[in-house]
Amino acid sequence: MITVREWRERLSEERAYDLIAELIEKARKNRYNSFITVTEEMALKQAEEYDRGERGGKLAGIPVAIKDNISTQGIRTTCASKMLENYIPPFDAHVVEKLKQEGAVIIGKTNMDEFGMGTTTETSYFGAVKNPKDDERVAGGSSGGSASAISGDETVLALGTDTGGSIRCPSSFTGIYGLKPTYGLVSRYGLIAYANSLEQIGPMASSIDDLGLLLEVIAGKDERDSTNSGRSFKYSPAEKKFRVGIIKEMNADERVQEVFDDFVSKISKFVEVEEVSLPSLTYALPAYYVIAMSEASSNLARYDGVRYGFALDSLDSWTNYFSRVRKEGFGKEVKRRIMMGSYALSAGYYGKYYLKALKVRTLVLQDFLKAFERFDILLSPTMPSTAFKIGELADPVTMYMADINTTPINLAGLPALSMPAGEVKGLPAGVQVIGRHFEENILLGFARMVERNEV
Ligand code: GLN
């Protein structure tokens, strides 16, 4: 893996053009299927600008890969769906504008679960992503392509999105660092929506400092996203005595739990650690899926084969046309979620499912806020297991269950990162570090201390 610091050292010795050309060649080979589109022309042009001294900024000359649900002007943005296979956005997402302003080199658009709906990147219309640590296994999802591109040395930095774990899960499975920011810290303008009230764009990298740097670039005020907090973020990792709580309700399989327990016993040599119970977490996963699917069913209504995306030649009756477009354009998992979400929102069931899920959401938030009266940081295993074999998770409910530790964080809008904690038979397992709203510097400060102590 390549850190920003290492890349800068290379830049001081070689032309950016040559370094980027080398990466592009790798990305083109696409050994892990990390990329849906390689933006060769743009990347080489940006590298040349850097070489001519015309590209400054916090990320000058640094390659960044972007998840393919984030709009890039003039570059197709597919959401890994047949529905948007040929969709070329006429504008840049807020985060892409920021990357460009800070001199980054955009090398490509990364593979993902279709519309972000999955935990393995197997629901992609463009095929599954392979894990660089073991290419018979998944890289996690839904930001699987961004994670494998970092873990497989195809980029230095990447953007992912996280609705219920999609940054943290693939980070855990591929042995990298990934952070889901506080809801409202990073503008969602230009992010193609899956479930608006839950998701954030966030940084993925191979070190804590690089996460902090990328977050600093993408966070900040943007009036085009009405849920944007208006706050900016300056990376300044906290140094203090952290009070750390271990969440009793968040567990993992035996082997991953061992890695986690080992991690906790090592950090307890230099921080105070105590167990804490958050009883409402038992109901968080089903509540998340009811809310996520309900929002998805509403968001995805816009794909009608008229305004943009996949279309058919013959137009018979409008209702026939609409359903044929959606039948052919969406994959199985997306259709399942649209149907379940519509069901949960329909008259007669709304109160029973959607409203109830919103109540659970409030309880989950309250439990977290209470725990944060005593602790600065809460910890859990990021995922209950290491990476699955490709094809192993055949039924959807088993896949949903894998999000048990990550989804509560999105319900509560909290920031959380996943950092590597160890391995089980050569497969990485991450620890989830959770903090108070807008206290990313505490999270990052804690994680950096752990990283420096080589836990
Ligand atoms: N696996 C979760 C889901 O399918 C989370 C996905 C995500 O964060 N985009 O909803």
Image (tube, rainbow, N blue to C red):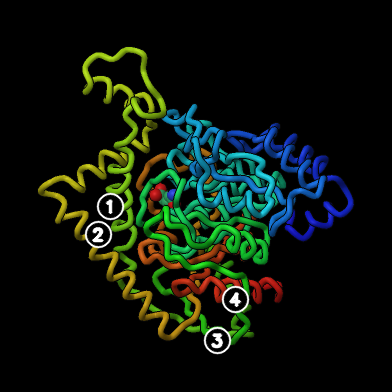
Give me the C-alpha separation between circle 1 and circle 2: 7 Å
Quadrant in the rendering for residue 453? bottom right
Mark 2: secondary structure: helix
Are the residues flagged by discs 1 and 2 in contact, CB closer than 8 Å? yes
Q: Is residue 189 left or right of residue 206?
A: left
Residue at 38 percent of width and 74 percent of height: 368
Residues 31 and 309: in front is 309
Residue at 37 percent of width and 77 percent of height: 369
| Residue position for label 2 | 357
Are the residues flagged by discs 3 and 2 in contact, CB closer than 8 Å? no
Q: Is residue 56 left or right of residue 336?
A: right
Are the residues flagged by discs 4 and 3 in contact, CB closer than 8 Å? no
| Residue position for label 3 | 272
Location of residue 321 in the rendering, given as x and y in whole percent from the top left corner: 27, 20
Residue 195 in view, yes or no: yes
Give me the C-alpha separation between circle 2 and circle 4: 32 Å
Are the residues flagged by discs 2 and 4 in contact, CB closer than 8 Å? no
User: Against 25, is 410 above or below?
Assistant: below
| Residue position for label 1 | 290
User: Against 72, is 94 above or below?
Assistant: below
Residues 201 and 372: in front is 201
